[in-house]
Amino acid sequence: MMGHLLARRVIGRDAKTHVIGRFDNLLIAEASAAGTPLIGRTLREIRLRDHVNIHVAGVWERGRFDTASSQTQITPSTILVLAGTRSQLDEYDGLFCIYHASEEPVVILGGGRVGSATARGLARQGFDYRIVENAANRIADGPEYILGDAADLETLKQAGIMTSPAVVITTHDDDVNVYLTLYCRRLRSDIQIISRATLERNVDTLHRAGADFVISESSMGANVIFNLLRRSDVLLLAEGLDVFKVPVPALLAGKTISDSAVRRETGCTVIAIDATDGVQVNPHPGTTLPPGAEIIVIGSAESENRFLDRYVNH
């Protein structure tokens, strides 16, 4: 599962959308803004929904997630979190597929079980990769494997670190992962860095070291167990960011999305309504939340707790 999650976060190769989760027909995707005309403009100036009916739920900036607003400014390191149907994502790709394309292999540091699973996940997506591993018994034949120390510059250069769009750090030693994150960030300010964290307390340290995305084993495991016990759907997008489905709370039933002020009150965003007539993706702010329906909501761990405390657990 860890390898699958890490591979799914590799989006530095182009500006197209990369699906990271789904609720029925609703797809959650991420897209890099690097190399596109979006840089330096706010979402109000971009007016994306005038060109393609897709919802920008939020943005990532070097491991920090912020709910999107009209004043959100796009930078070269911005990752857009998008919600839409397959056809809506295809429309977005049609606009941005020409930007920031790279065929260079993704670099994976560590060839153990997680590193190997990450490689399989990338292969399923059609991505080339290079695995750096210092244990000879973990090295297979083929150009994908580089025997050497990931802290050695020449080894990293052999793996393609200077041209690769992304590096995935998969060792089980968080101290090593922090060091490698710092090292790779100093080598390349523009590379996407994705790291595994064995202990949750090291997640913030990895972000400060320069990681764009960090996934901890504890959060991944807790998310799986929670879904099994509750028989519910909570999609872990990254450390501290979830998409979840809940019945329309009594306090919100009959109100429009705008009048409910969910985003202002909690920081969460309603990205779809699942009613008897189907799933309505990216509903207009004037859409009424019908009793008996379900809503699909995106938010950070803190905003999710505020939503549940205010509307569900009161």
Image (spheres, rainbow, N blue to C red):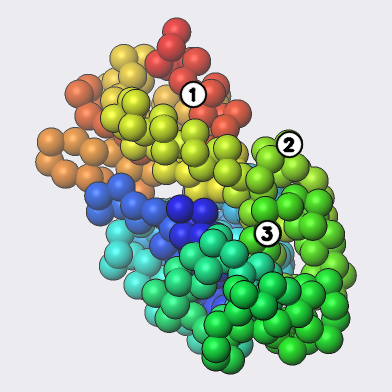
The one nearer the camera, 181 or 154, is 154
N-terminal of the pair, mark 2 or mark 1, is 2
Q: Position of residue 47 (x, y in %)?
A: 51, 62
N-terminal of the pair, mark 1 or mark 3, is 3
Q: What is the three-letter code of the residue carrying label 1?
A: Phe
Q: CA distance from mark 2 to mark 1?
A: 25 Å
Q: In the image, what residue occupies the spot 22% across and 29% down?
A: 293
Q: In the image, what residue occupies the spot 67% across and 38% down?
A: 200
Residue identifier under label 1: 307
Rendered position, 158 above or below 266: below
| Rendered image: mark on residue 171 | 3
- Quadrant of res 37: bottom right
User: Marks 2 and 1: which is nearer the front?
Assistant: 2
Are the residues flagged by discs 3 and 2 in contact, CB closer than 8 Å?
no
Can I make out residue 53 in this image?
yes
Q: Residues within 10 Å of mark 1 (few under 14, many from 20)?
A: many
User: Marks 1 and 3: which is nearer the front?
Assistant: 3
Q: Position of residue 49 (x, y in %)?
A: 43, 60
Residue identifier under label 2: 201
Q: Position of residue 220 (x, y in %)?
A: 51, 42
The one nearer the camera, 143 or 70, is 143
Rendered position, 65 above or below 144: above
| Rendered image: mark on residue 114 | none
